[in-house]
Amino acid sequence: MRILVVEDEQSLLNVIRKRLEKEHYSTDGAGDGLEALEYIRQVDYDAVILDIMLPGMAGTEVLKTMRREGRRMPVLFLTARDAIEDRVRGLDLGADDYLVKPFGFEELLARIRVMIRRNSLSGEQENVLSAGDLTMNIRTHEVKRGGAAIELSAREFEILEYLMRNKGCVLTREAIEAHVWNYDYMGGSNMIDVYIRYLRKKIEDGYEEKLIHTVRGKGYVLREEA
């Protein structure tokens, strides 16, 4: 999952990104509102953590522009303002949640999980995704097939989660790469194919039903065979 963190205080931006990446999220960071809007226009983020007081363009204006352009990705406002009027205004503008600084990281992580579940492309409202006898617990990071546990690396988990959340939809290699890696990524052009090969070996070897299918000239799709 990929999250954009927009915060003009560089040290706090770095801390938030580092903590999110420790929780297996892929992140991008922006220090002002105009830069944030450029990121948002290029990437379909799972969530945006948006400070209100920003140089270039205020967070409220970034959010208004996003919603006016039809970008529905969930947004959590992060701000030092704790007045009720400020919270109400942020929510009325289309924010999904509001967190006042200083905050606890466990609370931030919990709010992000709730936002993403609520706004999931698949409409999934629980912590567990499934495809056939393959299950994935988002909270515990447990993956099982037919009840047997499967060990995945953090990157394998992210790619499989993206496939499962978009079950039945064909995803291009570019879409998978953009969703899982941040802008600092300098990988090879065949990196997605390599990880798909790893995943197939782990979740399909020894099972008759294949779940990850190649769509020639387009990309990959996770679906249950009829």
Image (cartoon, helix red, strand yellow):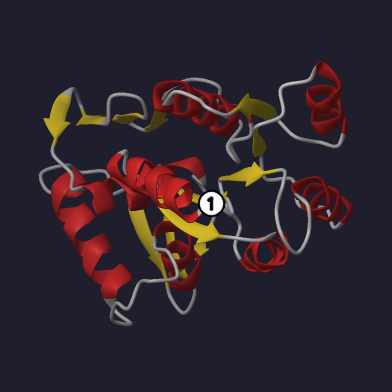
- In the rendered image, the vertical position of residue 146 relative to residue 208, given as above or below: above
Which residue position is annotated with label 1?
Answer: 9
Nearest to the observer: residue 109 or residue 8:
8
The C terminus - image quarter: top left
Q: What residue do we see at 41% from left, 28% from top?
A: 105
User: Label 1's element?
Assistant: loop
Residue drawn at (50%, 66%) of the image: 175
Q: Residue at x 62, y 26 (%)?
A: 100
Q: Quadrant of residue 177?
A: bottom left
Q: Amino acid at mark 1?
A: Glu
Q: Is residue 217 visible?
A: yes
Residue 222 visible here: no
Percent coordinates x, y for residue 127 in the rendering:
43, 22
Asked if residue 148 lies left or right of residue 116, the reply is: left
Indicate whether 127 appears above or below 33. Answer: above
Residue lying farthest top? 84
Q: Residues within 10 Å of mark 1 (few under 14, many from 20)?
A: few
On the rendered structure, is 205 left or right of 87? left
User: In the displayed structure, would residue 195 be above or below residue 187?
Assistant: above
Q: Position of residue 78 (x, y in %)?
A: 62, 36
**Residue 58: image x %, image y %?**
78, 52
Q: Is residue 53 left or right of residue 61?
A: left
Image spot of residue 68 (x, y percent): 89, 53
